Amino acid sequence: MWISAIPRATQLIQRRNKARAQLQAVLTPIEELITQYPDANDKNAAYREILARKLAVDNRLSALVNADQQVIDHYDEDHAEFTETESYEVEILARFARLSMFVEEFQTIRFQQPVIQQASLDHNMAALQPDQQTHYKSVRLPHLEMPTFHGDLLTWAEFIDNFKAAVHNDPRISDIQKFTYLRNYVDGEAKR
């Protein structure tokens, strides 16, 4: 039987520090891309690059949260490592929230219809009989590019933020349509 010469606490901190370094390696460049976004010539390409890198951030953040939880579970609340771990996690989560808000804002802008099209739609809707309006609205569900929620609690916050931005907070979408969208974007354990 092999016994580790490194104490458990040291192993946990090393694992946590490795997770921090890996997260920093992907989070810092994506923050720079967001800073440069207003000056980008091709905003769609810049957004796709940010979105692709965000997937790596999501995975690395999940690994860090797990490593942090092990450190927090190992130490008492009054220990310096416990406090430092929680403080660092709050800072990282704030940075991740800014990234998520950027993605949410872009999705909100991307999925909103231009005002002229909406005004034209409202004018055409007014010309229809009330029962025709309901039918017309019920068949107008455009496909949204949104990740599917599979029941993983670590991805819930991002999913619900994206869903609210793209669907729930849009007053033009009826409750039935919102529910339909929700059912289409949940799967597995979350759909039960």
Image: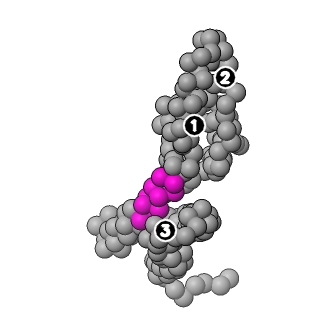
The numbered disc on residue 117 is 1
Spatial CA span between label 3 and label 1: 27 Å
Which residue, as the protein is rendered here, is positioned at the far bottom?
5
Mark 2 vs mark 1: which is more N-terminal?
A: 1
Q: Position of residue 36 (x, y in %)?
A: 46, 72
Label 1 packing within 10 angstroms: few (<14), some (14-19), many (20+): few
Number of numbered callouts drawn: 3
Q: Nearer the viewer, residue 108 or 192?
A: 108
Mark 2 sits on what residue?
136
Residue at image position (55%, 70%) is 41
- Name the residue rendered at 28%, 67% in the picture: 78
| Marks 3 and 1, the one that precedes in the sequence | 3
| Magenta highlight on residue 136 | no
Please give the name of the residue rendered at 63% of the width and 49% of the height, measured from the top-left corner: 146
Q: CA distance from mark 2 to mark 1?
A: 15 Å
User: Could you classify mark 3 by the number of other residues whose Cα lies within 10 Å: few (under 14), some (14-19), or many (20 or more)?
Assistant: some
Q: Main secondary structure of the magenta part?
A: helix
Between 191 and 68, the one lying in front of the other is 191
* Above-or-below relation of 99 to 165: below
| Rendering quarter of residue 178 | top right
Look at label 3 and name its amino acid. Answer: Tyr
As shown in the figure, which amino acid type bears the numbered disc 1?
A: Gln
- Residue 95 position within the rendered picture, expressed as x and y whole percent measured from the top left: 41, 65
What range is drawn magenta here? Answer: 95-106
User: Which amino acid type corresponds to the residue marked 2 in the rendered image?
Assistant: Tyr
Where does the N terminus fall, quadrant-wise?
bottom right
Residue 37's disc is 3
User: Residue 165, position in %: x, y?
Assistant: 50, 44
Q: Give the foreground label among 3 and 1.
A: 1
